[in-house]
């Protein structure tokens, strides 16, 4: 009895860990840092549907990414946008926030996932966009 309860608990844990995390990523064909970010997501357990686009500005407009938050690639998970080099951990945070339409790392800060250049790390923030289209800081990463 005790053993089967333990087995059940283990199984429940595994089932939770195996929850599929699928994200659509839209990017330009020749974007190297976009591919590096996709690798970062895959390393963190995401399944990535990779979409090569010819007009990223149109994609961002369609997905509701404000120009002030724009970066290179645009992801979509659970109907929310993920703009730029957002760390995988913050995408998980975004999923827990029904009040947010999406999250972004504007620009392309050096040291964010997929933007690694040697030891240099620029300070950057992950910005959430709420339903009133106001910015909310989701995470703050210090530079070096
Ligand atoms: Cu980039």
Image (cartoon, grey):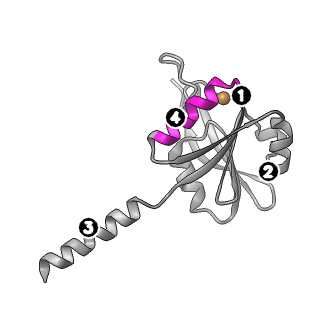
Mark nearer the N terminus (1 vs 4) = 1
Q: Nearer the viewer, mark 3 or mark 1?
A: 1
Q: Which residues are magenta?
A: 29-42
Q: Which residue is mark 1?
A: 29
Mark nearer the N terminus (3 vs 2) = 3
Q: Secondary structure beneath disc 2? A: helix
User: Disc 4 vs disc 2: Cβ atoms closer than 8 Å?
Assistant: no
| Residue 39 circle label | 4
What separation in Å lies between label 3 and label 2 (alpha carbons)? 39 Å
| Residue 98 circle label | none
Residue 78, image x, y percentages:
64, 60
Dot 1 beta carbon under 8 Å from ligand 1:
no
| Residue 10 circle label | 3
Mark nearer the N terminus (3 vs 1) = 3
Dot 4, crowdedness within 10 Å: few (<14), some or many (≥20)? some
Q: Secondary structure beneath disc 4? A: helix
Res. 51 visible in picture: yes
């Amino acid at each position: 009895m005790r053993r089967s309860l333990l087995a059940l608990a283990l199984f429940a844990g595994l089932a939770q860990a195996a929850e599929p995390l699928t994200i659509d990523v839209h990017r330009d064909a020749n974007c190297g840092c976009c591919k590096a970010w996709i690798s970062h997501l895959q390393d963190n357990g995401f399944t990535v549907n990779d979409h090569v686009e010819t007009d990223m500005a149109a994609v961002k407009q369609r997905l509701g990414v404000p120009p002030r938050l724009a970066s290179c690639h645009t992801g979509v998970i659970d109907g929310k946008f993920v703009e730029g080099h957002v760390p995988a951990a913050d995408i998980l945070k975004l999923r827990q926030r029904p009040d947010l339409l999406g999250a972004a790392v504007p620009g392309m800060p050096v040291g964010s996932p997929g933007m690694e250049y040697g030891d240099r790390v620029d300070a950057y923030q992950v910005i959430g966009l709420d339903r009133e289209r106001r910015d909310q800081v989701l995470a703050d990463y210090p530079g070096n």
